[in-house]
Amino acid sequence: MIKINTLLAILLVVVTSPLMAMEKSNKERLNFITNNDMCITSYSKQNMDLWVKPCDFLGKPIFDVFQLSNKDRNAIIVGCCTAIEKKATVKVPYELDEMNFIAKITALKIEHTKYNYFVKIKQLDDENK
């Protein structure tokens, strides 16, 4: 039986996908749901190619899939903690393969001390740096 939290996480991705489609079609976006251990449990994308096949990242820790610098890895971890503390979406800029991105992290409380994270990733162009 699928846990209610997993169903809610999947529902969140399904519900937000049509809303993303309402935006301009040239917007690129990649969304992840990660569990409390930062393992990727689901994803959705819009106008963005995946660098890794879903079978190679689903169920794996996000830091094992994306090789970030220590500085950027720590920034993502701090962003997750800040999202919990402030109960707000936190923006975390980072670099991957010499390209700039921003991760918008929202903590989704599932139990007293456990969270899932909704992570929206957008590539920054020169105008948004």
Image (tube, rainbow, N blue to C red):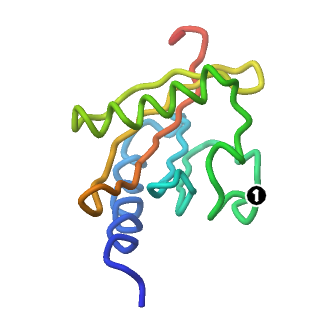
Left or right for 95, reference 24: right
Which residue has dot 1 on it?
Answer: 53
What kind of residue is marked 1?
Lys
Left or right for 98, reference 94: right
Residue at 22% across / 38% down in the picture?
87
**Residue nearer the viewer, 82 or 8:** 82
- Quadrant of residue 15 in the image? bottom left
Which quadrant holds the C terminus?
top right
Query: Where residue 54 appears, x then y in whole percent?
Result: 69, 61
Q: Is residue 112 above or below residue 65?
A: below
Residue at 64% across / 62% down in the picture?
58
**Residue nearer the viewer, 24 or 129:** 129
Q: Secondary structure at mark 1?
A: loop
Q: Is residue 16 above or below residue 125?
A: below
Left or right for 49, reference 90: right
Q: Residue furthest bottom?
A: 1
Residue at 35% across / 29% down in the picture?
90
